[in-house]
Amino acid sequence: MPNTATNFTPDLHQATEQAIEQASAPNLTQSERFQKLLESISAPILQVEKRDSGAFHDRDVQIVAIHEFQNSPEYANFKAVIQNTLQQLDVIANSSPRPGSQGNRFQNFGKDLFVQVTEDQRSRFGTSQADLFVQSCPDANRLLRMYTFAKQRPELVASGGAENTRASITELSQRLGMCGPGIVQYFDEAVKTVRQLTFTPSMPERAEALRIQIVRNAITEYLNRPEATNKIIGSEVHTVAAWQNHFSRMFALPTISDVYANANITINQNEQAELAIKLSALQSGSVISTILANQILEEAQEMWRHAQANGNNDLSQYCMTLLEKIKERHGPIQPYTVMLLNDDGMPSRIQDNPTLLALDIVGQADNATEVHFVKESVKEWAPTHQHAHGKISLKSRGNLNWLETAPPPGSSEKPQQDLMSMERMTRQQVVELLDTLWTPQQTDLNVRQAMHEIMQNDWGKSWPPIMAQTFTEPNSRDVFVNLVIGIANGQKLGPLEPTAEFGRMMIQALEGLTESAALKKYSENEIFQLLEYTQQWNDACHELYELVQLKPLCELVSDYINHPVHIPLYKAVHRYEWKHWHDFAYKRALITPPFFYKYYREGYGEAFIEAIASEAPQHLKEIARHYSNNMCDVRLSLKFVDLTGTVDMFATELDPSGVRTLISRCFTDQIALSVVKALNDRGFSLKPACNRSFYVKLSYGKWSTASYLKKNIDIPLSKRILKWVRNKSHALSPRRGSAPA
């Protein structure tokens, strides 16, 4: 319980006006106005002398403390002020346009609040009345003062301050049906929300508030996970409070006074360990600042979209207005952290990379005593080749990566921070960076992660697949895959022209291509372009550099039965073989294609056929005819039909059209029906192939197919056959009768 003097004047209006006058003084920051406005609000003192009965939280002692306060001279003023406050909060909540916001919820809460608590008589709040007196009642005064100030001095608070405060008060009014400890937390949450939205806190204060909120969100998410053995029972607010109190010392979290936040809720040691790991990852400055930076940039994007909808299409003219709005919400920030500048130094678009803004935020937070981030080390790599006008280095802190240019010795300027980019590096520096990729363990900085960041910064706008990639340490070799596929598809490594390094990177990438996690983000055409680029490299540079061998990759991909590979890779490799090793590809296509049951895997047969159609379409009919009796999946036959526009490659002496052969190979009625419909949809004439004898044959095991043909094709049938058809059921098997002659 706070040990503050009780100071409740019955003239609430006079006290509020005095506080507003003090908070309106010139040259105050938003945080200072907030403090001035609320500093005269105090909490009542509820305490008794220590007795043998035990701690203060003992029910009997709490009741004594409540009774002593209710019998004190200050209680009458206290009750009058709070009742007046709750009445005015109802007026504010009822003025909201939100449906269902009307009512006297605050005053109804007040009626229960001032019920006498006794040992024999139960009341709604019981001994929680003490926490409501000490915490929620002052919070009610705080909300009223903040709303009144925002209403009277809108120019001294953030834009929309009064509306945001009213919305928070209205939302609070609809949560007053909770138990006492829950209401205490909701009042506290409402005050913090209004503080954030109306009285712009400093960036460090906002970052610390976000850290605490992220922890609470993570606890809630963890407790509601699908595999949770102990789901939240009853009110979520108490369970989250219990876990927050459990981790309060470990993660410097504020404790919550809640009699229902029982410590027994947190005794599961497995949950303690799992949740501790989860929360530990959310305590660093780099993580919190990145989340906050993303929120600010999303707001900036939304402001710019709204401005464009109203006809403002020139960001260079609107930028000052946008920055002023962001300043109202979040405090002053550097323009370059929010907007990208063109070559003329004018804003061209809103930043989509939060790194620079996050660095600005974490730089302010590092020097603030109210922030409790875990310590992070800054890692660095600097090329040996430097310019006299400033030393550049690549740096990282947690998940933040940036390029920093130090001023020349003796200069008073601060180091300049930029996004990592090869465009800011010389040719020699890029070569040095590429050299470090082979031995990343010899550098303090994670150079492979840095290279991944560089590719996203330099290529992101013109090469969308790189933005879908996520760097992970177990797959760090994928940096070579991303590099060479990007280069093969027209991306540049800053000022660097092709050198021996390109060949080394291609060799490294091809060696790990079949196991690459990055490959799943690329299309067959993008992978094929890599193979084409490799061939062109070999043709152009075979006298200067080591050849890049493609044969081992092709052999490994062909052995997909024992080593399944990404299907776009499989297709790209076969396209390459048909284009550059035509005779080899043709001979292999006649020996072991992926059509047989022995070799069949879903998707590979279709990819094999599409590769032929792309690079050697003249062989499609020949290969289809060669394997017409051995295809394990009728869908492969339909693929040939789609690509050639005919079914005559399945023709036989008894079936010149090939249609009956294709239908007969279907193992089930369902597949046969789908094939018949597919052929009919593709415009093939079924009538010449589907004669009376074929219809009768189908009627035994493929009744749905036969019925479809009878309905859509005029098949001449004798009266005897028609009578047999009418008597045949869907479940008829060949054993239960024979067809008429």
Image (tube, grey):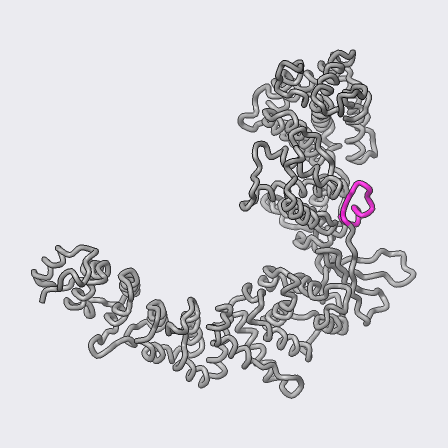
- On the image, the x and y values in percent for residue 199 come to 74, 34
Q: From the top left corner, tell me how far across and down residue 255 is, in percent.
A: 73, 35
Q: Position of residue 53 (x, y in %)?
A: 75, 21
Position of residue 116 relative to residue 685, above or below, is: above
Q: Tell me the quarter of the image containing the C terminus.
A: bottom left
Q: Quadrant of residue 68?
A: top right
The residue most toward the front is 52
**Residue in the foreground of this view, choosing between 516 and 96:** 516
Q: Is residue 238 left or right of residue 358?
A: left
Q: Residue at x 75, y 15 (%)?
A: 69
Tell me the residue at 86%/56% (across/down): 413
- The one nearer the camera, 630 or 195, is 630
Residue 282 in picture, x, y percent from top left: 69, 48
Farthest-out residue, left: 719
**Would you place residue 353 above or below residue 96 in this image?**
below
Bounds of the magenta segment: 361-374
Q: How many marks?
A: 0
Q: Residue 195's image quarter? A: top right
Q: Report whether residue 95 is seen.
A: no
In this rendered view, identify the residue nearer to me: 98 or 376. 376
From this viewpoint, which residue is outermost toward the right? Answer: 410
Tell me, yes or no, if residue 459 can be seen here. Answer: yes
Q: Quadrant of the N terminus?
A: top right
Does 254 sit left or right of 111 as displayed?
right
Q: Is residue 468 above or below residue 150?
A: below
Specify whether residue 371 is painted magenta: yes
38 drawn magenta: no
Answer with left or right where residue 30 lies relative to residue 180: right
Identify the residue at image location x=66%, y=15%. 119
